[in-house]
Image (cartoon, grey):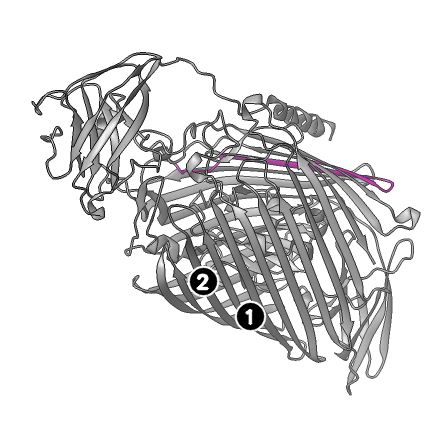
């Protein structure tokens, strides 16, 4: 039995009869204390994290012998045995060895509980805060571009070919923040801009249908953003960046905007007052945009409060608000003027405000049960000046969930929960609509033997959206993990997914490009079934590799298209089958001072209905990255290749509509990003500096037809912590 | 390892290719200009004004607007992908229409009166120098030159005979 949710595990000492305690110190190889180390008692739900001085303490532990697991990003995982005696404190001193590669990261998304990546029966990827910071990502989706099997069309995520491009309406990938669904109530899209990127601990990506645990939208996978814990000692971090875009590659493309700049600042302060942990975060960003009429300004605030009610009860609340003003660049004038929008789009503006409020209560019942109750409220509001008149939308989503995780002798685990949601949308473009749903789920993980685990689960969802037919879904899952030897995990899984139509897809009524877009009150949910076999192999302390074969079958796919009368409409039009293979490897070399990451994915996304390839999916994706540390310098290079998208919406680029002139121009994508970093710690300055050169060779490409990607940008980032 | 790094270096070199570039104009179609005045009478209700375009057809009678445009036998002003329409509810409108040079047998104001872009069209007015409305007058557009005086009278209550089958 692996460790449990680390986020639950920061509890103060407790002295109880017939119990003892475990305390100690965690240090690095050179004797420096290590803060933030996860300390977990294997086979129980108990654990904690180390303080700034590297110390930890776990009390109220029943008498017995336990295995304690210590893990921290950048260090090898360690295990220690501890015999707890009544009324006594067992003391441990643990030394962690630095490791550039985390061969066996801990994940929480696959089973709604903490487990080793090798124990997950489905393919997963993890990107930690170090990687996110290293890429100077302004939003999380920037970082996702380098996860094997993931690609983005603008900000729409596609995991292993599951999604094409639906113009912001609906997503076949569910995004969670700390396990709570984070999608808008109107369009059902992922909202990367609202996530305070500086407060992200790690991002976990589940590749494949996951509706058996997460319900609607988890058709193609799940992205779970885990926010940072609140440290015990006061800490203040200031991060600021500034940079500019290079001039266009061709004189014809110059549009007269001069040098275009971007900059941003983020300030974080956290402290513990009494037993209450508090984190405050504020940021602003301004981006002139490299195209005409393409600027954005964004302000983001985030508050997290962690209140231990007792040694076994924890209450956590977060509040997040974002205000943004931006222009709307839908597509270029033509490829002779790719940085200029058509005249009719000049001056289009969008102003939006979003806020997210969530609370979570955790109760640890002894050493073999955790109960969690959580709720959230997500409001999105925008007004735009696109088209002949100003339009606006306001949507509210309220969600609640209660779940329990139970441990049984022999390492068996049962997870069960209920969920509910209420949605309301009031908008000019899709009217006033309300809906809701209830769900219940259960998952059992049965350890047939220490080297063979079976996971069986199912979730029942009932969703009802306004005048659409109510729909009920039962989505099962089955997974096995076989460990023939230490460091080797063979996995196989089957899971079903579904996605209910969003308000935007069902009820949109507007016009674009002179053509009407009409509602479709007969939309049905789309469904998928995913199968996968894979293997994860740890090779010593400096290498890990993973291979997977996968297939997903989709039915009633909701696609945007045109009716015979050339009205735009979302409809259940397509059956599809996506097959593919994926391989990834992370290797440490040169005495582990350098790390090389490789990922390759091949997908064959077939539109079964039309016997053609699915739209907006590249067949080949190859990502490679290298990070080298030489003394206090860091040099990193990332390379990204995506094959040319073979099929698009031809109606947009051919007569009679021909809305996007030269929209048929698209190429293979080859992008190289370069980073230099320096840590000023040796000169006693709490400062790091990073120079990012994105799109080093200024390769010109499109992810979305009629939208050229950013040229080279050069950005300097400074971060100081007090 | 060296092989892997070498392979990555070679792949990275592909990024030096440059990618997309401005399209080269393979064949320059000679263009000319048509100018004139459209005069309107008896505007209909807005619900029957889904679209209004000036269309120049190579041959008369045309099959239908979309087919003729699709097959390059008609030019539309403003272009059909452009959301800017011929303005509604004005007394008259001067136009400057840049289109491929050649002879256009039929120049008309096309009104989309219903929601269907493929079928709900009619001619609301046509260029005609005489009173024989069954055969419209043709317009010669000369390359790099302007053909003026293409004046069209539009009476929504009294449209010309339907040219579309």
Of A309 and A215, the residue lying toward us:
A309
| Magenta region includes residue A276 | no
Other residues around mark 2 within 10 Å, as few (<14) / some (14–19) / many (≥20): many
Residue at the location (80% across, 62% down)?
A235
Task: Residue under label 2, please give it.
Answer: A395
Q: From the viewer's perspective, tell me whether residue A597 is left or right of residue A492.
A: right
Q: Residue A183 at x, y = what percent?
A: 50, 58
Q: CA distance from mark 1 to mark 2?
A: 35 Å
Picture layout, residue A392 above or below residue A635: below
Residue A414 is labelled as 1
Q: Residue A414 at x, y = what percent?
A: 55, 70
Q: Quadrant of residue A423?
A: bottom left
Instruction: Tally the numbered discs.
Output: 2
Main structural element of the magenta stretch: helix, strand or loop?
A: strand
Mark 1 or mark 2: which is in front? 2
Other residues around mark 1 within 10 Å, as few (<14) / some (14–19) / many (≥20): some
> Is the same chain shared between marks 1 and 2?
yes
For disc 1, the chain is A
Of pointers 1 and 2, the one earlier in the residue sequence: 2
Asked which secondary structure carries label 1, the reply is: strand
Picture layout, residue B132 above or below residue A94: above
Residue at the location (75% across, 69% down)?
A48
Q: Residue A253 at x, y = what percent?
A: 55, 26
Q: Quadrant of residue A469?
A: bottom left
Picture layout, residue A708 above or below residue A325: above
Q: From the viewer's perspective, tell me whether residue A588 is left or right of residue A375.
A: right
Question: Which segment is the magenta one?
Answer: A613-638
| Residue A79 visible, this orientation | no
**Residue that lies at the very extreme toward the front in this rendered image:** B91
């Amino acid at each position: 039995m692996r460790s449990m949710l680390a986020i639950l595990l920061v509890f103060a000492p407790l002295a109880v009869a017939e119990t003892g305690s475990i305390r100690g110190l965690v240090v690095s190889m050179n004797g420096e204390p290590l803060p933030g180390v996860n300390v977990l008692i294997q086979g129980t739900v108990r654990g904690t994290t180390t303080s700034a001085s590297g110390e930890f303490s776990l009390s109220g532990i029943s008498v017995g012998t336990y295995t304690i697991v210590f893990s921290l990003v950048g260090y090898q995982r360690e295990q220690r045995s501890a015999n707890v005696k009544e009324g006594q404190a067992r003391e441990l001193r643990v030394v962690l060895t630095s490791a550039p590669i985390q061969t066996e990261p801990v994940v929480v998304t696959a089973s709604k509980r903490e487990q080793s990546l090798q124990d997950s029966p489905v393919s997963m990827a993890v990107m930690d805060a170090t990687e996110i910071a290293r890429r100077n990502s302004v939003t999380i989706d920037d970082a996702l571009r380098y996860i094997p099997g993931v690609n983005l069309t603008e900000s729409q995520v596609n995991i292993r070919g599951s999604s094409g491009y639906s113009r912001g309406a609906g997503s076949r990938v569910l995004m969670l923040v700390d396990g709570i669904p984070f999608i808008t109530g109107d369009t059902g899209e992922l909202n990367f801009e609202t996530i305070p990127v500086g407060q992200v601990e790690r991002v976990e990506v589940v590749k494949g249908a996951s509706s058996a645990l997460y319900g609607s939208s988890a058709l193609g996978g799940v992205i779970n953003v885990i926010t940072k814990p609140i440290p015990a000692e006061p800490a203040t971090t200031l991060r600021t960046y500034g940079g500019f875009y290079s001039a266009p590659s061709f004189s014809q493309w110059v549009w007269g905007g001069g040098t275009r700049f971007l900059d941003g600042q983020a300030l974080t302060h956290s402290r513990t007052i009494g037993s209450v942990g508090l984190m405050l975060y504020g940021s602003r960003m301004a981006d002139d945009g490299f195209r005409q009429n393409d600027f954005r300004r964004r302000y983001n605030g985030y508050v997290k409060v962690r209140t231990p009610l007792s040694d076994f009860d924890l209450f956590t609340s977060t509040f997040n608000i974002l205000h943004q003003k931006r222009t709307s660049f839908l597509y270029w004038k033509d490829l002779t003027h790719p940085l200029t929008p058509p005249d009719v789009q000049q001056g289009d503006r969008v102003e939006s405000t979003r806020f997210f409020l969530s609370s979570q209560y955790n109760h640890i019942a002894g050493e073999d049960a955790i109960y969690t109750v959580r709720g959230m409220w997500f409001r999105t509001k925008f007004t735009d000046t696109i088209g002949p008149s100003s339009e606006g939308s306001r949507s509210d989503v309220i969600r609640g969930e209660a779940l329990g995780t139970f441990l049984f002798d022999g390492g068996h685990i049962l997870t069960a929960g209920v969920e509910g949601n209420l949605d309301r949308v009031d908008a000019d473009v899709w009217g006033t609509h309300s809906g809701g749903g209830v769900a219940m789920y259960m998952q059992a993980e049965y350890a047939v033997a220490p080297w063979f685990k079976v996971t069986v689960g199912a979730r029942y969802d009932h969703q009802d959206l306004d005048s659409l037919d109510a729909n009920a879904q039962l989505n099962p899952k089955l997974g096995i993990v076989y460990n023939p030897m230490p460091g080797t995990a063979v996995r196989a899984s089957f899971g079903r997914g579904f996605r209910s139509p969003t308000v935007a897809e069902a009820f949109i009524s507007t016009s674009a490009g002179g053509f009407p877009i009409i509602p479709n009150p007969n939309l049905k949910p789309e469904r998928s079934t995913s199968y996968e076999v894979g293997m994860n192999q740890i090779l010593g302390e400096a290498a890990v590799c993973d291979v997977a074969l996968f297939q997903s079958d989709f039915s009633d796919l909701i696609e945007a298209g045109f009716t015979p009368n050339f009205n735009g409409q979302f409809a259940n039009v397509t059956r599809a089958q996506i097959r593919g293979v994926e391989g990834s490897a992370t290797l440490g070399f040169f005495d582990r001072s350098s790390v090389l990451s490789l990922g390759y994915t091949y997908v064959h996304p077939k539109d079964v209905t039309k016997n053609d390839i699915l739209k907006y999916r590249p067949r080949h994706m190859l990502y490679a990255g290298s990070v080298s540390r030489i003394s206090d310098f860091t040099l990193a290079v990332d390379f990204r290749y995506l094959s040319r998208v073979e099929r698009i919406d031809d109606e947009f680029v051919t007569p009679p509509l021909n809305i996007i002139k030269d929209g048929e121009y698209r190429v293979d994508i080859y992008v190289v990003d370069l980073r230099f970093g320096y840590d000023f710690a040796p000169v006693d300055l709490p400062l790091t500096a990073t120079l990012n050169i994105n799109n080093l060779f200024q390769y010109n490409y499109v992810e979305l037809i009629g939208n050229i990607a950013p040229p080279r940008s050069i950005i300097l980032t400074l971060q100081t912590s007090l | 390892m060296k092989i892997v790094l070498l392979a990555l270096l070679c792949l990275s070199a592909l990024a030096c290719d440059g990618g997309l570039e401005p399209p080269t104009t393979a064949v320059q179609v000679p263009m000319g200009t048509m100018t004139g005045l459209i005069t309107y009478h008896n505007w209909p209700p807005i619900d029957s004004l889904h679209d209004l375009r000036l269309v120049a057809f190579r041959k008369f009678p045309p099959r239908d607007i979309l087919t003729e445009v699709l097959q390059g036998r008609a030019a539309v002003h403003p272009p059909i992908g452009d959301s800017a329409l011929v303005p509604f509810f004005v007394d008259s409108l001067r136009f400057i229409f840049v289109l491929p040079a050649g002879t256009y047998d039929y120049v008309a104001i096309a009104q989309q009166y219903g929601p269907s872009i493929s079928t709900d069209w009619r001619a609301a007015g046509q260029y005609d120098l005489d009173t024989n409305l069954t055969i419209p007058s043709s317009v010669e557009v000369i390359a790099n030159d302007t053909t003026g005086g293409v004046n069209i009278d539009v009476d929504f209550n009294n449209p010309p005979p339907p040219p579309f089958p």
